[in-house]
Image (cartoon, grey):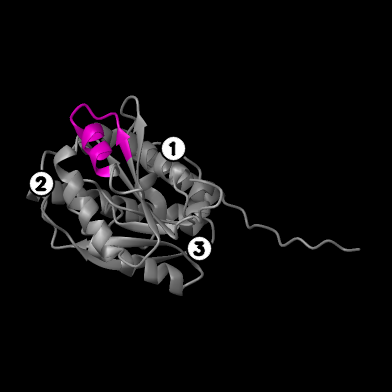
Amino acid sequence: MRESEAAPAVGVVIPVKNEAGNLAPLVSEIEHALAGTSFEIVYVNDGSTDATETELAALQTSRPWLRQIKHATSCGQSAAIRTGVMHARAPVVATLDGDGQNNPAFIPKLLAVLADHPRVGLVAGQRVGRKDTGFKKLQSRIANDVRSTVLRDGTRDTGCGLKAFRRDLFLSLPYFDGLHRFLPALVRREGYEIGYVDVVDRQRGHGVSNYGMWDRLWVGILDLFGVWWLVRRKKRVPKITEIS
């Protein structure tokens, strides 16, 4: 971006790995959903081995607001989200998954809640009408129940990729692999409130999921208790006044 160009109002960050078939439809939907808004889309290509890079490059030729950041090797969803947020130019960021299950039509609702409530630091989509398999829904329900019981974060579904938050707040949070699953608890830890929007789930567009559950189960358990420790150890920030 040249110095004379104003930063967009909203950055949409999408982590993807081998999602070539889902790129064009999702870009078109986001463009329609945010019509009339100053926005950018930042795709983070997390070490894809299919045609993701080529497809994104082709889409970029006619869309100056579309950007591609590439990881040389796959580093995981949390790393990809953080890379996208770091490279975003907008003060407000929305995220969604790149497989088409998250409907971009809900992004304006997330942004409206964030804009209307100054104490809200994160607006989280809460999926209804889940389109996953019964087994995957069971996995998700168990994970959400355990997390909610331990952290008491007041959130029924942290796995939904549709979120909106203030960029500076996100970047101030302690970073670790798996961060995206614990955002409500960490944002509350910083003294902010959480907003919620029910979003209707959809079927995946093309391909198969690249970020599974069982490969992160035990790490996720360790992360859960690490976040529990962080929340408990948070100290009140002192109010400071200089006396002259």
Q: Is residue 122 left or right of residue 168?
A: left
Q: Residue at x 23, y 46 (%)?
A: 98
One can see residue 225 in this view: yes
Task: Locate residue 166, reporting x and y percent.
Answer: 47, 58
Nearer to me, 53 or 244 = 53
The answer to whether 162 is drawn above or below residue 79 in the figure is below
The answer to whether 153 is drawn above or below residue 143 in the figure is below
Task: Locate residue 26, reporting x and y percent.
Answer: 21, 51
Nearer to me, 60 or 168 = 60
Give the labeled residue for mark 1.
Answer: 176
Q: Earlier in the sequence, mark 1 or mark 3?
A: 1
- The type of residue carrying mark 3 is Tyr
Q: Is residue 95 left or right of residue 89?
A: left
Q: Residue at x 24, y 51 (%)?
A: 27
- Of the two numbered discs 2 and 1 in the rendering, the one whose residue sits closer to the viewer: 1
Q: Please tell me how crowded label 1 is: few (under 14), some (14-19), or many (20+) other residues with Cα within 10 Å.
A: few
Q: Earlier in the sequence, mark 2 or mark 1?
A: 2
- The type of residue carrying mark 1 is Phe
Span highlighted in magenta in the image: 44-59
Give the labeled residue for mark 3.
Answer: 192
Q: Residue at x 18, y 31 (%)?
A: 51
Q: Quadrant of residue 108?
A: bottom left
Q: Residue at x 29, y 50 (%)?
A: 146
Task: Locate residue 8, reporting x and y percent.
Answer: 45, 57
Give the labeled residue for mark 2.
Answer: 135
For the C terminus, which image quadrant?
Answer: bottom right
Nearer to me, 40 or 63 = 63
Q: Quadrant of residue 67?
A: top left
